[in-house]
Image (cartoon, rainbow, N blue to C red):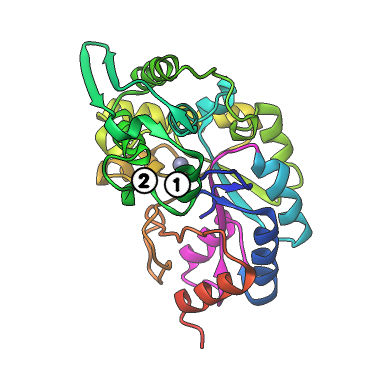
Amino acid sequence: MYHRISEPDLDPWGLSVSPDHFAEQLEVINKYFHPLSMQEFLVHVQRGSVPNRSIVVTFDDGYVDNLQHARPLLTRFDVPATIFLVTEAIVEGQNFWWDELEWALLQPGTLPDWLELRVSGSRYEWQLGDAQQYSLQERQADRQRRPWNSIPGTRLAFFYLVWQCLLELSNPKRLEAVDAIRTWAGVSNNSRPGDRALSKNEVNVLGEGGLIELGAHTMTHPSLKGLSASQQMKEISGSKAQLENIIGHPVTSFSYPHGEYSVETMEFVQRTGFQGACTTAFKCVMPGADPFQLPRFQIDDWSGEEFLRHLARWYALS
Ligand SMILES: [Zn+2]
């Protein structure tokens, strides 16, 4: 499971692999493994005969660097991939909300001492204390730290608290909140252009030649298991319809945002006409696996050598 092929100066969620490391990783896949698209893989799973050392490369979300950096390298090493797209971000040409939030809250400098959010009748409040200040050195140090491991009272910890709060909101309320936070922080709304989602046109270019399969990842990237049945259905079938409308052919692969789903979610995904869905459970797909619960390993910014070491362990190769 990949997200981005890029080198941002800060990457709190660890979503990026550099183009150089991605090239090294693809070389390893090409040399020692049997790369398949998700569709090919599912056919093998159904037959109960998956080729030895099969590997499926997937990307979640649909960042523009998937076209700029990933596609040329996938083509060079002849490795197929399946890219799961957040369709509303593509239709609307939006940046993802978590990047907007990072842009507003994780810039070096001083923020006001407290943040109050009023979102459609609810009120949230944070006192920043020491988190008001954020030096360049702290930001540098945070390159090695994940938000869930942040030190309480720091800017990164504050960012994580706000992120957790926004995650619980509905998409319109979340966007309203991000807007209010941007104004509060005094930042403009044109964040790093490299952070944006693919456009409709770019999605079609990405799919040209058939090496890359396009899959759906909901319309707005909610945690599905927390939604009502009708909201889940809307997110799942809506993303399929939007993507099919953009690319003009059936979309049959899905991945659950945040890796979160319930039994009901799986039923909806199956009923909508998808043939398989990926989770974020950290393990290999074993014989007899449920095609609607395919686990994946997140790949970090590893060199080819480190990547091979991890794969060898996961595949129990000697
Ligand atoms: Zn995602």
Where is residue 162 drawn, in percent x and y?
A: 32, 31
Q: Is residue 120 magenta?
A: no
**Residues packed near mark 1 inside 10 Å, few (<14), some (14 to 19) or many (20 plus):** few
Q: Identify the residue position indicated by label 2 in the image.
A: 147
Is there a contact, CB below 8 Å, between mark 2 and mark 1?
yes
Q: Which residues are magenta?
A: 35-64
Question: Residue 251 got which mark?
Answer: none
Seen in the image, is 70 located left or right of residue 256?
right
Residue 276 visible? The answer is: no
> Which of the two discs, 2 and 1, labels the residue nearer the N terminus?
1
Disc 1 secondary structure class: loop
Where is residue 310 drawn, in percent x and y?
A: 50, 73
Question: Residue 13 got which mark?
Answer: 1
Residue found at x 44% / y 59%? 296
Residue 201 visible? The answer is: yes
Q: Residue furthest bottom?
A: 318
Q: At label 1, which amino acid type do we have?
A: Trp
Q: In front: 68, or 273?
A: 68
Q: At label 2, which amino acid type do we have?
A: Pro
Q: Which label lies toward us, 2 or 1?
A: 2
Residue found at x 59% / y 50%? 82
Seen in the image, is 57 located left or right of residue 203?
left
Residue found at x 27% / y 31%? 129
